């Protein structure tokens, strides 16, 4: 019985199909442990060996890794939601209701929303961990800066997504947020200094061209705002975030891997 | 029994008012960081028990139950537990390493930092495990709590209170004390710039790559003050304790739109010209003193600029003192060592960020203790 089992196992694990995909068999020798890391584009984000102290859960809390994982969960569930959701004033809310009521055991929206909240918290925790281990100190200063940009992008991702259900919670939260843009010094119609920017008595900064207008695409929250936030939320900010994450991960390795005492 | 509970709730309501709760939290939090006995496993267990039992007991109250369990408040729970546990994990290791270094031992991380671990299988499996646990947590959460969906958007029906997403509620809370240009635009920008500047300001080479507290006290206390006291503490305040009209409601108070709060906030210039100089001028028979608040308009004429300056001289003087005099004085005084280590450029940036950060609680206390509205109130910009 056992020899047969071993035979099957070997045939599966060392088969041509498996080898063609993974290039290495069972990683049971050091050589193969190196090869499996180098031969796989995803695993190859990692080096083949890392500092033992940096692997410990109590050191990193896996907070950066989980931030990235939550980002992936959000991408997946977000794409599934995009199949059903149409970003127009007439349809957005009813699509939400449909996603909620018409799908038996449907939890895509729940997964997406709770993961988004979790990601915001996880990124803040990751920043806290990096601070507490002093990992922003040389040579990792620049990666901390990239991290701060990622933190801002995470907030923006969550903020733009908040509008999409087009319910009371959504539009009023975004109203409160986008009203702040109105108060931008010089660039917001209600901000300090804007009144000085005039040309022959004609104001240059007004409700039709100020920072708030740039954000919401109109003088009042409306269909164009929804469209704008949809594009920002589903395309532009994720793209930018991915680029910065790529730099972030690249720099972790170039800066000598996870930090540790000298 | 009921009267005791009732009385207890009243006490908690009273001391939840931001002036009290903010001060108590700040003092307790900062002093706790120094007390080693808190940062142990027993401490963590006690913390979790206290939060869970306290929260459970408080949720029995109908009013607290309705405000806390609003649809999108789930992250508040995650925040309290997540930040609490992580704070313990960090401070436990920090104090442990401090203790080791007092005994001339290297930090605990050093014991394994020269060894290497295979990523496959060790790290990959840890990551896999984390992902699975995270997924299970998310699925359970999603199955048990529905994502909120309120009535369809209606621009004609403004809910009271209107709140930003939870992570911005600390900033929205600051709108009580600062104008939107400040709390909504300038402060967030300075926070972001300040965070980015940290690695270039903190030139202390100690504590790179391991947890510690003693060797990095100034850096850690500053960061924690910003992160826990000013950002994370104000979020639940804005979420749970601010009801209709952004008025304060204690955790066990019912939200009603009819709560009337007397608005008696006073500008610094009114204190100066009306409350201090006016009676003094009358007494000394000095007309220029007893003239009351100088009259201003929003023209840019020299006369008006002078009037504005006259009216706001104390506030402007204070800001000049704060941002121009203090940095120099401190560089020559008790921050001399700091200044010499950082050099002029870094020191200027660092001290500007410190002082700006300190202005936030300063103005909050101005409001709480003296109903202070604006420190400087010009027709063009109010601070
Ligand atoms: C979307 C957000 C982010 C993702 C996905 C992410 C991901 C990661 C990952 C996977 C690591 C490896 C170590 C670990 O897991 O802790 C890491 C390290 C690091 N992160 Fe992030 N991060 C994010 C945001 C941030 C933020 C907000 C900061 C700081 C402000 C930051 C600064 C750093 C630094 C300095 C390191 C190197 C730490 C070390 O070597 O110990 N990251 N990040």
Image: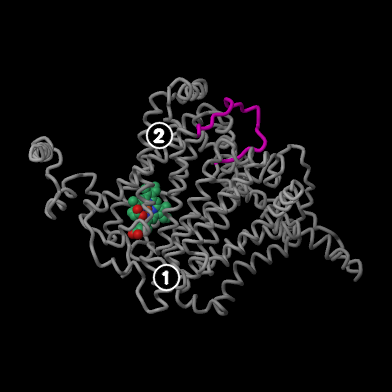
Vertical placement of residue A158 versus B14, above or below: above
Q: Tell whether position B200 is magenta.
A: no
Which element is circle 2 on? helix
In the rendering, at what x and y percent does residue A171 appear? 56, 32
Q: Which residue is mark 1?
A: B203
Magenta segment's dominant SS is loop
Q: Is residue B148 magenta?
A: yes
Q: Which residues are magenta?
A: B145-165
Asked whether disc 1 touches disc 2, contact meaning CB atoms under 8 Å apart, the reply is no
| Quarter where residue B374 is shown | bottom right
Residue at 37% across, 47% down: A66
Q: Residue at x 57, y 25 (%)?
A: B152
Crowd rating for badge 1 (residues with CA inside 10 Å; few <14, some 14–19, many 20+) = some
Residue B324 as seen in the image, left or right of residue A244: right
Can residue B96 be seen here? yes
Q: Tell me where residue B140 appears, x and y as whole percent.
A: 43, 37
Q: Nearer the viewer, residue A18 or A67?
A: A18
Reading the image, the residue beneath label 2 is A234
- Tell me if residue A24 comes above or below residue A81 in the rendering: below
**Along the line of sight, which residue is nearer the eye, A242 or A116?**
A116
| Residue found at the very far front of the displayed protein | A1
**Image position of B62 (left or right of A160):** right
* Residue B381 vertical position relative to residue B112 in the rendered view, above or below: above
Q: Is residue B354 left or right of residue A124?
A: right
């Amino acid at each position: 019985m056992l020899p047969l089992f071993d035979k099957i196992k070997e045939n599966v694990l060392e088969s041509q199909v498996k080898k063609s995909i993974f290039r290495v068999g069972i990683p049971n020798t050091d050589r193969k442990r190196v090869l499996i890391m180098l031969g796989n584009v995803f695993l190859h984000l990692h080096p083949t060996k890392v500092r033992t102290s940096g692997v410990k859960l109590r050191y990193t809390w896996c907070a950066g890794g989980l931030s990235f994982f939550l980002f992936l969960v959000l991408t997946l569930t977000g794409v599934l939601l995009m199949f059903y959701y149409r970003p127009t004033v007439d349809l957005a809310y009813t699509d939400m209701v449909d996603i909620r009521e018409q799908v038996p055991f449907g939890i895509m929206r729940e997964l997406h929303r709770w993961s988004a909240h979790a990601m915001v918290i996880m990124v803040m925790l990751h920043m806290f961990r990096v601070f507490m281990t002093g990992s922003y100190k040389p040579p990792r200063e620049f990666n901390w800066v990239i991290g701060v940009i990622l933190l801002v992008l995470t907030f923006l991702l969550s903020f733009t997504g908040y509008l999409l259900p087009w319910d009371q919670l959504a539009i009023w939260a975004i109203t409160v947020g986008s009203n702040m843009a109105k108060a931008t010094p010089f660039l917001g119609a209600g901000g300090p200094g804007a009144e000085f920017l005039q040309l022959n008595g004609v104001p240059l900064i007004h409700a039709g061209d100020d920072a708030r207008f740039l954000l919401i695409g109109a003088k009042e929250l409306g269909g164009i705002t929804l469209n704008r936030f949809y594009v920002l939320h589903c395309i532009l900010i994720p793209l930018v975030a991915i680029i910065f994450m790529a730099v972030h991960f690249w720099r972790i390795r170039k800066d000598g891997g996870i930090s540790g005492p000298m | 029994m009921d009267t005791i509970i009732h009385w207890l709730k009243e006490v908690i309501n009273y001391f939840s008012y931001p002036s009290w709760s903010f001060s108590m939290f700040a003092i307790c939090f900062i002093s706790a960081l120094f007390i080693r006995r808190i940062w142990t496993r027993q401490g963590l267990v006690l913390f979790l028990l206290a939060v869970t039992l306290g929260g459970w007991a408080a949720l029995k109250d109908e009013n607290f139950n309705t405000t806390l369990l609003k649809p999108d408040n789930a992250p508040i729970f995650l925040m309290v537990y997540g930040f609490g546990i992580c704070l313990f994990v960090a401070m436990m290791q920090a104090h442990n390493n401090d203790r080791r270094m007092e005994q001339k031992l290297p930090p605990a991380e050093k014991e394994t930092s020269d060894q290497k671990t295979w990523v496959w299988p060790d790290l990959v499996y840890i990551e896999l495990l984390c992902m699975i646990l995270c997924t299970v947590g998310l699925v359970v959460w999603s199955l048990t709590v529905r994502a909120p969906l309120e009535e369809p958007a209606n621009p004609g029906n403004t809910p009271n209170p209107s709140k930003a997403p939870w992570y911005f509620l600390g900033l929205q809370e600051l709108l009580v004390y600062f104008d939107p240009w400040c709390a909504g635009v300038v402060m967030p920008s300075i926070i972001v710039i300040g965070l980015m500047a940290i690695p270039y300001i903190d030139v202390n080479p100690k504590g790179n790559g391991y947890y510690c507290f003693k060797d990095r006290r100034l850096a850690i206390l500053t960061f924690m003050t910003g992160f826990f006291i000013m950002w994370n503490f104000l979020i639940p305040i804005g979420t749970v304790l601010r009801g209709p009209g952004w008025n304060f409601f204690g955790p066990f108070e019912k939200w009603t739109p009819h709560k009337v709060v007397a608005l008696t906030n006073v500008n610094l210039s009114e204190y100066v010209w009306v409350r201090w100089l006016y009676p003094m001028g009358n007494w000394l028979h000095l007309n220029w003193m007893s003239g009351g608040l100088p009259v201003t308009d929003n023209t840019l004429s020299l006369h008006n600029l002078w009037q504005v300056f006259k009216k706001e001289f104390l506030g402007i003087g204070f800001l000049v003192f704060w941002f121009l005099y203090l940095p120099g004085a401190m560089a020559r005084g008790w921050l001399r060592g700091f200044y010499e280590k950082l050099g002029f450029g870094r020191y200027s940036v660092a001290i500007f960020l410190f002082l700006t950060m300190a202005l936030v609680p300063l103005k909050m206390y101005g409001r709480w203790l003296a109903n202070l509205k604006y420190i400087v109130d010009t027709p063009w910009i109010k601070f």
